[in-house]
Image (tube, grey):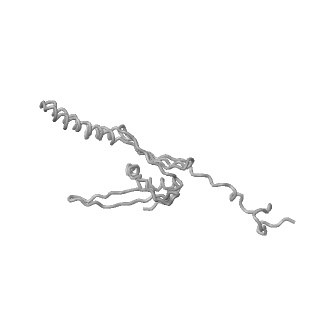
């Protein structure tokens, strides 16, 4: 006579050993990319007015008043180049890649000037922390925020990955931070 399901003793019994789901490995979370929003035409135009037009004006000033060559080399050209570089760097994009398939967490920052990236093993990530502080200048108080992914390497060394630049560009940065923490599979503290 066959036993009822509640009378089954061992997990190997055929008559209802419980769930077969215990034998299946858990599916990893899907890979996901988070990228800063594209710049609008108005934003690019305003940044052009703020950075490039003054550089052109300064260069024109030096040419128009026949400045000596040493003034031109020491002041005019560096000022113009710095303004153009500032314009291009203000149009940079940031991307966070959460890659469960290869156990990698990568933050990338790319612009016309250059690019940089930093990566860490995804399995070592522990939590995403939100911090806020108030800086007091002589004239005003300013709130600064920070988002940092904390982790521990296999050797027990603590590491940090700063994602403030990426999250600060979103309108609702706290909600996006929670979404990133869920995608990584870690706790959001903030």
For this orientation, the residue located farthest to the left is: 65
Left or right: where does residue 90 sit relative to residue 124? left
The residue positioned 54% from the left and 50% from the top of the image is 103
The location of residue 25, given as percent across then percent down, is 65, 54
The residue positioned 63% from the left and 55% from the top of the image is 26
Q: Is residue 91 above or below residue 129?
A: above
> Quadrant of the image for the C terminus?
bottom left
- Which of the 4 image quarters holds residue 70? top left
Q: Is residue 182 above or below residue 87?
A: below
Q: How many marks?
A: 0
Q: Is residue 123 above or below residue 43?
A: below
> Quadrant of the image for the N terminus?
bottom right
> Looking at this view, is 73 or 175 the one in front?
73
The residue positioned 80% from the left and 60% from the top of the image is 14
For this orientation, the residue located farthest to the front is: 155
The location of residue 168, given as percent across then percent down, is 38, 51
The residue positioned 30% from the left and 61% from the top of the image is 134
- Which of the 4 image quarters holds residue 146? bottom left
For this orientation, the residue located farthest to the right is: 1
The location of residue 128, given as percent across then percent down, is 45, 58
> Looking at this view, is 44 or 129 the one in front?
129
The location of residue 83, given as percent across then percent down, is 26, 39
Q: Is residue 104 above or below residue 155?
A: above
């Amino acid at each position: 006579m066959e036993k009822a399901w509640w009378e089954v003793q061992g997990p190997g019994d055929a008559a209802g050993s419980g769930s077969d789901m215990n034998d299946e490995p858990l599916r990893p979370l899907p890979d996901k990319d988070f990228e800063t929003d594209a710049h609008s035409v108005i934003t690019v135009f305003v940044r052009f007015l703020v950075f490039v037009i003054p550089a052109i004006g300064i260069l024109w000033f030096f040419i128009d008043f026949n400045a000596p060559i040493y003034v031109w080399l020491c002041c005019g050209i560096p000022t113009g180049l710095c303004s153009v570089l500032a314009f291009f760097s203000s149009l940079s994009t940031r991307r966070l890649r959460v890659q469960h398939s290869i156990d990698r967490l990568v933050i990338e920052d790319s612009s016309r000037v250059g690019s940089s990236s930093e990566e860490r093993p995804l399995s070592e990530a522990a939590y995403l922390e939100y911090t806020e502080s108030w800086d007091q200048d002589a004239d005003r108080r300013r709130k600064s925020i920070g988002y940092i992914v904390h982790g521990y390497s296999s050797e027990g060394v603590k590491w940090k990955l700063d994602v403030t630049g990426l999250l600060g560009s979103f309108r609702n940065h706290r909600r996006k931070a929670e979404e990133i923490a869920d995608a990584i599979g870690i706790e959001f503290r903030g």
